[in-house]
Image (tube, helix red, strand yellow):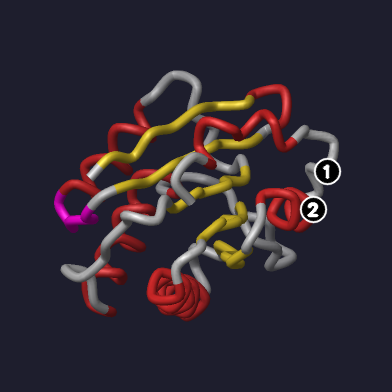
Amino acid sequence: MALDVRFLKQHELIVVSASGAMYLDDVIETISRFARDPDFVWNHDRIVILKNDVEFSELNAERLTDIMTAMKQSYLEGKELDPSGQPAYRYAVVVGSTINKVMMGLFGAVLESDKVSRVALQKFDSVSDALAWLGRENIPESEFEEEMQDI
C-alpha cells in the first residue's frame, strides 16, 4: 500500500493518491501520521486519487467503520463543528475501476451514517469534475499529473 499526500495550502486542499492493497492497520496508521503533519489542517477538503491497482479486498463495512472512527479521533477530536450541519470537510474521490467505485460508495454510506463526523464523499471519473464539486475549478488539472498516472 502506498498513500502519498500533498498539502496545497493556498487552495486549502489535501491531495492523496493511493495504490496497492489497502490494509486496515496501514490505513489507520497513515491517518494518524497525516494528522500529526505540521502542514495538515483538519477541515481542508481532500481530493483522493485511486490508482488502478488499488485493492480493497481486506476491507468490509466493519473495517470501513474502524477507518471512520480513526478519522474522527485523529481529525475531529476537540474540534468545533459547524452547528448548521454542513460537512466539516469533503472527500472528492477520483476512481476508475468499477469495484473501487462500489467500495467508495460503501465508505460514503458509512461516513453518512455518522452524523457526528459530518464528512461528505462523492466519486468522480475525472479530476476536473472532482475539483468542480469542491469549488476549486481554478486549480489546473496539470497540478495532478503525477497522481493521475496509472488511473
Question: How far across and how far down the image is residue 105, in percent?
Answer: 48, 77
x, y percentage for residue 77? 40, 48
Range drawn in magenta: 21-25
**Residue at point 23% right, 55% down?**
22
Dividing the picture into quarters, in which one does residue 74 lie?
A: top left
Residue for point 72% across, 37% down: 141
Q: Residues within 10 Å of mark 1 (few under 14, many from 20)?
A: some
Q: Is residue 23 magenta?
A: yes
- Circle 1 residue: 137
The image's mark for residue 132 is 2
Indicate yes or no whether the magenta region holds residue 98. no
Amino acid type, mark 2: Ala
Q: Is residue 50 visible?
A: yes
Q: Quadrant of residue 3?
A: top left
Image side of residue 79 versus residue 74, left or right: right
Main SS, magenta residues: loop
**Kind of residue at badge 1:** Glu
Residue shown at 21%/55% (left/top)? 21
Q: Is the residue under label 2 in contact with that under label 1 (CB below 8 Å)?
A: yes
The tag on residue 53 is: none
Relative vertical location of residue 112 with respect to residue 89 in this rendering, above or below: below
Give the CA separation, mark 1 to mark 2.
5 Å
| Residue that appears at 29% across and 32% down | 33
Give above or below for 132 relative to 38: below
**Residue at the extreme top of the image, as rendered:** 38
Q: Nearer the N terminus, badge 1 or badge 2?
A: 2
